[in-house]
């Protein structure tokens, strides 16, 4: 029953053989992945009337006295040409000592050569490279796959519209969901490829000519005030860095000092207790000797006390 309804909707008998995509739609089989560019499709000859699609990528490295200003100028030139900036990264010179800025710019493919000529005037050009990749086959393949999937989606929509059996309707919905997901993925790839064709990528590397970058200029009274402020900030930053460097050592010293003080106090406490015990023992012996002498006097022992003469 399931095979008969789709067959009637598709306009052929269930036993007839046809292309893979229509056959899977008719039987509501699980949706297969979007057709890949096989040898037959990828290597198929392209008609001579088909427009060639070229993706151009350029790389340029220049040196200048002020990388930041040159980078801003390059971005302005790209936007004025109808392009945009995709990424920007800056390095103040932590690795090589020279300030470095990297830009990823997108400019219209038709204006690539003119934009590169303008970039060359921004500084001393070190290297320039332009690469062109023919993606005509990839574009034709994507268009064909999108068209085939769109036909499959339309056929499934017609089957769902005419379906009377709930089970057949559920199977058609599942197949349609997979087909639609594959179609959306292919369309996204086609949009990305079209953007690469229409807008060329320019990777621009800008490096400072001297280590450390341009020295600041202090002019007039307020320039000296600014210089003094920068010096104060530099000293304060250095003090904070030194404090941060010594902080772990200070913690260790404080802990060691606390332990030493505790040991000294404990030693003094024990010494004081021993001294007090010794003094108490001496007093007890003295009292004992005095008591013994008194006992001897009471018993009449010892030499008689001499009496004075007449």
Image (tube, helix red, strand yellow):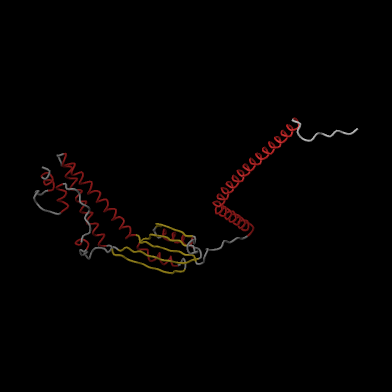
Q: Residue furthest top?
A: 298
Q: Is residue 196 above or below residue 15?
A: below
Quarter of the image where one finds residue 6:
top left
Q: Quadrant of the C terminus?
A: top right
**Spot occupied by residue 2 in the image (x, y as percentages of width and height):** 12, 43
Nearer to the camera, 273 or 29: 273
Q: Quadrant of the N terminus?
A: top left
**Spot occupied by residue 178 in the image (x, y as percentages of width and height):** 23, 48
Quarter of the image where one finds residue 107:
bottom left
Q: Taking 174 as reference, is 133 left or right? A: right
Give the number of marks.
0
Nearer to the camera, 144 or 2: 2
**Spot occupied by residue 274 in the image (x, y as percentages of width and height):** 64, 41
Q: Taking 50 as reference, is 278 left or right? A: right
| Residue at position x 74%, y 30% in the image | 299
Q: Is residue 277 above or below residue 240?
A: above
Q: Residue furthest right?
A: 310
**Spot occupied by residue 169 in the image (x, y as percentages of width and height):** 17, 41
């Amino acid at each position: 029953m399931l095979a008969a309804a789709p067959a009637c909707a598709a306009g052929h008998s269930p036993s007839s053989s046809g292309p893979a995509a229509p056959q899977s739609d008719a039987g509501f089989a699980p949706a297969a992945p979007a057709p890949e560019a096989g040898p037959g499709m990828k290597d198929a000859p392209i008609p001579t009337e088909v427009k060639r699609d070229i993706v151009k990528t350029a790389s340029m490295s220049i040196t200048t006295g002020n990388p930041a200003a040159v980078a801003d100028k390059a971005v302005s030139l790209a936007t004025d040409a109808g392009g945009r900036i995709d990424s920007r990264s800056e390095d103040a010179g932590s690795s090589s000592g020279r300030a470095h800025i990297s830009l990823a710019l997108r400019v219209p493919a038709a204006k690539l050569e003119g934009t590169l000529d303008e970039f060359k005037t921004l500084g001393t050009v070190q290297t320039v490279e332009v690469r062109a990749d023919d993606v005509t086959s990839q574009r034709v393949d994507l268009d064909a796959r999108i068209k085939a999937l769109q036909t499959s989606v339309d056929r499934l929509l017609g089957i769902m519209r005419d379906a009377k059996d709930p089970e057949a309707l559920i199977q058609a919905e599942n197949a349609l969901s997979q087909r639609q997901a594959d179609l959306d993925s292919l369309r996204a790839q086609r949009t990305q490829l079209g953007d690469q064709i229409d807008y060329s990528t320019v990777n621009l590397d800008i490096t400072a000519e001297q280590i450390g970058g341009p020295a600041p200029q202090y002019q007039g009274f307020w320039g000296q005030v600014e210089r003094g402020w920068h010096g104060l900030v530099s000293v304060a930053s250095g003090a904070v860095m030194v404090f941060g460097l010594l902080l772990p050592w200070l913690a260790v010293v404080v802990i060691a000092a606390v332990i030493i003080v505790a040991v000294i106090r404990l030693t003094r406490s024990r010494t004081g207790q021993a001294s007090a015990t010794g003094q108490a023992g001496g007093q007890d012996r003295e009292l004992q000797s005095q008591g013994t002498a008194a006992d001897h006097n009471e018993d009449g022992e010892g030499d008689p006390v001499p009496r004075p003469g007449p």
